[in-house]
Image: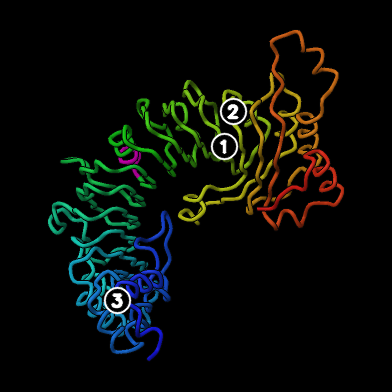
Amino acid sequence: MSTLSTVPDDVLLIVFETIIGPATLPWPTAEYSPERAIAPFTLAAVCQRWRSLAQATPTIWSYFGFPPELKLHTQHLRRLDILVSLAKNVTIDVLFECDGWRPDTAQLWNRLTLLMAQWRTAWITISDGFKNPFDPDLMPQILHRLKQLVLSCNFAHICLPNAPVMARLYLNCNSIDLQYSLPQLPSLRSLICLTAEQATTESLCRSYASQLVELCIVDDMVHGFSEPIHCLNLATLILDDALFIPQIHAPNLHELAIRAHTLRGLGDTGFANVVHLVLYGDVHEQAADRLQKLRSIVTISFAAPEPIESLCSWRSIHYTVTAGFFNQLATVHPPIFPALESIHFGVAGSIIPFQSLLDFIESRNQVTEEDGDHAETNWQRPSILKRVTMSPELEISMPQWASTRLSHLLQFEPAAQ
């Protein structure tokens, strides 16, 4: 008798669930996983006992992901039939990406839309020609199980569903019909908005402002919002255009990510509690001046934030830090970012101005006679720079002299990340 034959069913189910993987699709990005798609079929093919146990466990058949190019559409349609049969009424994860309409892909998509009431997480990318499941005449009135929706489409008419447990919503659409009724999304905490209409973006942000914890706006709006928006619970704010900053009041914000060269000023935003700043685009000395109000910054990262990097492939996500930026940090008094302790350079960067970076670190980490001159005043010395990290690609490009001096200034080897 083999060892596996003595394993109880409940333990074997734990093994099945571990092999199948996480219960939901990643956020905010997801790619078709052939390994996850085939996993339940592989388990069911081991032996008769495993087949019976797998077929009696609906949760391991909940991944309804399909590749962008359905070359073997007949096999995928057959797989969908099996999934529908074995998943029964459990919640399912749907991943469907297709840029061009074809009869075979349309047939598969139509079948998936019939299962909307079971959707738990959905990553949908479709174009004209496909059935619009978000048409109010076709969509279920309430999607009780939907927790996460990523929707990218160019339908002329889209209505959002009422989804009482949906916590995360990503929209890349031309427009959303909010004229008659606003969707009931009481659990919404994360909103990523890439709509083409300014009125739609503003209406969504304003409607859910009080409950959002994370907000990402990627929109080329000429005038910004018509009136300020108050986001009392917002912890993370990501703006591809910093035009919005003076109009978003978020007193409890902890993380701010912006395309630096779009920054005009902070206004009276009340961002006093921001501790993590992410900058990308052209980071020049004017950016340092315009960010002086952020007195609590502990870490600065030069890198595109995850939603921008993963979802906005058509935009430039690179960053360039000028020598003037670090020169401003080194010379301006009172110091900019007095609480700064850590700097990270991400993978998308170009040449780093090592000399000015090192001069800035030295200005913060070396005790000078000027420090003693301020001993009798209320002047407070800024924090010591403790950590400088960079992507392996950038670390390789770092000259030996710069690496040696950086290690000396930090008093330990700079860590790579």
In the rendered image, residue 43, in percent from the top left (x then y), is placed at 35, 81
Pick whichever of labels 3 and 2 is earlier in the sequence.
Answer: 3
Spatial separation of the CA atoms under disc 3 and disc 2: 59 Å
Is 198 colored magenta in this rendering?
yes
Rendered image quadrant of residue 68: bottom left
| Mark 1 lies on residue | 277
Rendered image quadrant of residue 341: top right
Mark 3 is surrounded, within 10 Å at the Cα level, by few (under 14), some (14 to 19) or many (20 or more) other residues, namely few
Q: Amino acid at mark 2?
A: Leu
In the rendered image, residue 245, in percent from the top left (x then y), is placed at 47, 30
Pick whichever of labels 3 and 1 is earlier in the sequence.
Answer: 3
Disc sitting over residue 9 in the figure: 3
Magenta region, mostly helix, strand or loop?
Answer: helix
Instruction: State the SS at label 1.
Output: strand
Q: Amino acid at mark 3?
A: Asp
In the rendered image, residue 79, in percent from the top left (x then y), is placed at 28, 80
Pick whichever of labels 2 and 1 is earlier in the sequence.
Answer: 1
Q: Residue at x 61, y 37 (%)?
A: 299
Q: In the figure, 170 relative to 387: above or below?
A: below
Q: Looking at this view, is 154 or 51 the one in front?
A: 51
Residue stretch rendered in magenta on the structure: 197-201
Instruction: State the SS at label 3.
Output: helix
Instruction: State the SS at label 2.
Output: loop
Farthest-out residue, top: 376
Q: Residue at x 55, y 29 (%)?
A: 264
Spatial separation of the CA atoms under disc 2 and disc 1: 10 Å
| Mark 2 lies on residue | 291
Do residues under tags 2 and 1 come within 8 Å of each other at their CB atoms? yes
Rendered image quadrant of residue 55: bottom left
Is 414 colored magenta in this rendering?
no
Q: In the figure, 128 relative to 295: above or below?
A: below
